[in-house]
């Protein structure tokens, strides 16, 4: 039995709890645990639908998920309350860290440590593409589109926005669901 | 430029990018680097790499790097302008995508089986893949200038793919190596 729908205030504190629990990582797992299991705002199916929508639309996935949950119960106000709850503490910490950084990054000791951290973080950035590569590996058209996108950005030095505005509709046309046959193949 | 000019420049920049953050927002990193370093000179290349690492290491969504870029842009006018510009940057990058997401959440039932949705999901996936590889390469080139740094990056990339160890450990160990002067810029 789901609990009654949460007020904007409850959404704010729920997402605050998610953000605080997820220090050190695992934001979407914590979000599921708190929203579905502890507070029972929505069923697991509804939560997974939300994740799908959050990944599909532009914007950071975890923030989109907070928006989805907030909007479902209280529209735009709910979305704002959920984002505020999710970002208040981490964003304040990040701003403080940023201020410390800009004060101290010229110190050789700080610069040396950061040089190492930066190399590790670059490895994380490099892994992002590889992480989703397996989803497209068996689809030559997808690989071709990915390669063309990569070349447009890296070799031809086109900017992201024109690449998405030109490549996006072309790729959508190629993947537009046509006959029942191609539907059945999915 | 006054603090207000910088603030407005930051807001315009991120408002315009918001709806292009496909695949969870990381697709914009290359654009962030280009705009904040080459176009507007808010920060240096090394600072961009540092801020990216900071946003990855700090708790919370790493997309909050936008707040740090705003902070860096506004800081030349004082701490208050820095924090204000950082906050404005974060709001600007989130507002358009949030409005779209609210609309999506409220109308998903009607939208989910439409051919547009299917084509959007399947067509933009491969584009996102290509962008993410490009972003990875750009961040790598921004961050690493020394062979050992490249070794660390490739090692971390492999560990991210084949283990479930928290990347915080990788950053801590690499930070230690850097602190001992083993990794250089």
Image (cartoon, coloured by chain):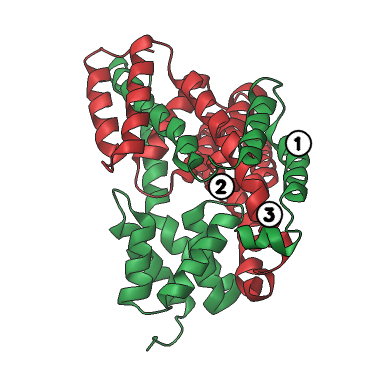
Label 2 Cα crowd, 10 Å radius (few <14 / some 14-19 / many 20+): many
Q: Quadrant of residue B74?
A: top right
Q: Nearer the viewer, mark 3 or mark 2?
A: 3
Count residues near mark 3 (Cα–Cα under 10 Å), then give few for <14, some for 14-19, many for 20+. Answer: some
**A1 is higher (above) or lower (below) than A37:** below
**Residue at screen point 66% across, 45% down:** B20
Vertical placement of A67 versus B57: above or below?
below
At a point 27% along the width and 32% down the height, the residue shown is: B170
**Distance from label 1 to label 3 (Cα)?**
17 Å
Find residue A154 and report its image quarter: top right
Instruction: Tell me the tag on residue B117.
Output: none
Which residue position holds label 1? A162
Residue at 63 percent across and 22 percent down: it is: B38
The residue closer to the viewer here, B36 or A155, is: A155
Q: Would you say residue B81 is visible in this rendering?
A: no
What's the CA distance linking mark 3 and mark 2? 12 Å
Of A131 and B46, the residue lying toward us: A131
Against A147, is B45 above or below? Answer: above
**Horizontal and vertical percent position of residue B174:** 27, 25
**Which residue in the structure is indicated by mark 3?**
B120
Q: Chain of mark 3?
A: B
Give the chain coloured green.
A
Chain B image colour: red
Q: Which mark is residue B23?
A: 2
How far separated are the C-alphas under marks 1 and 2? 17 Å
- Does residue A111 appear to the left or right of B126 in the view shown? left
């Amino acid at each position: 039995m789901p609990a009654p729908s949460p007020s904007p205030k409850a959404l704010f504190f729920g997402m605050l709890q998610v953000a605080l629990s997820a220090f050190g990582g695992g934001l979407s797992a914590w979000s599921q645990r708190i929203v579905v299991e502890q507070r029972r705002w929505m069923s697991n199916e509804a939560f997974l639908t939300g994740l799908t929508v959050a990944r599909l639309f532009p914007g950071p996935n975890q923030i989109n998920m907070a928006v989805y949950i907030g909007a479902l119960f209280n529209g735009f106000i709910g979305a704002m309350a959920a984002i505020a709850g999710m970002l208040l503490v981490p964003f304040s910490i990040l701003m403080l860290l940023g201020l410390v950084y800009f004060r101290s990054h010229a110190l050789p000791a700080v610069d040396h440590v950061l040089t190492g951290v930066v190399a590790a973080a670059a490895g994380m950035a490099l892994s992002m593409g590889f992480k989703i590569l397996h989803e497209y590996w068996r689809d030559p058209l997808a690989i071709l589109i990915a390669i063309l996108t990569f070349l447009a950005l890296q070799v031809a030095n086109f900017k992201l926005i024109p690449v998405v505005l030109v490549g996006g509709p072309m790729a959508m046309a190629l993947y537009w669901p046509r006959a029942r046959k191609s539907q059945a193949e999915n | 430029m006054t603090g207000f000019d910088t603030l407005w420049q930051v807001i315009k920049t991120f408002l315009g990018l918001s709806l292009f953050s496909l695949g969870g927002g990381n697709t914009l990193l290359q654009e962030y680097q280009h705009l904040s370093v080459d176009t507007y000179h808010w920060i240096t290349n090394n600072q961009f790499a540092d801020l990216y690492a900071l946003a990855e290491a700090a708790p919370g969504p790493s997309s909050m790097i936008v707040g740090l870029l705003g902070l860096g842009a506004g800081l030349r006018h004082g701490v208050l302008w820095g924090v204000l510009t950082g906050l404005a940057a974060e709001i600007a990058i989130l507002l358009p995508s949030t409005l779209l997401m609210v609309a999506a959440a409220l109308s998903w039932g009607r939208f989910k089986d439409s051919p547009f949705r299917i084509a959007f999901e399947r067509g933009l996936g491969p584009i996102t893949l290509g962008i993410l590889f490009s972003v990875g390469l750009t961040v790598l080139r921004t961050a690493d200038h020394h062979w050992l740094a490249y070794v660390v990056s490739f090692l971390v990339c492999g560990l991210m793919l084949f283990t479930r160890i928290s990347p915080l450990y990788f950053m801590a160990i690499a930070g230690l190596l850097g602190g001992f002067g083993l990794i250089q810029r």
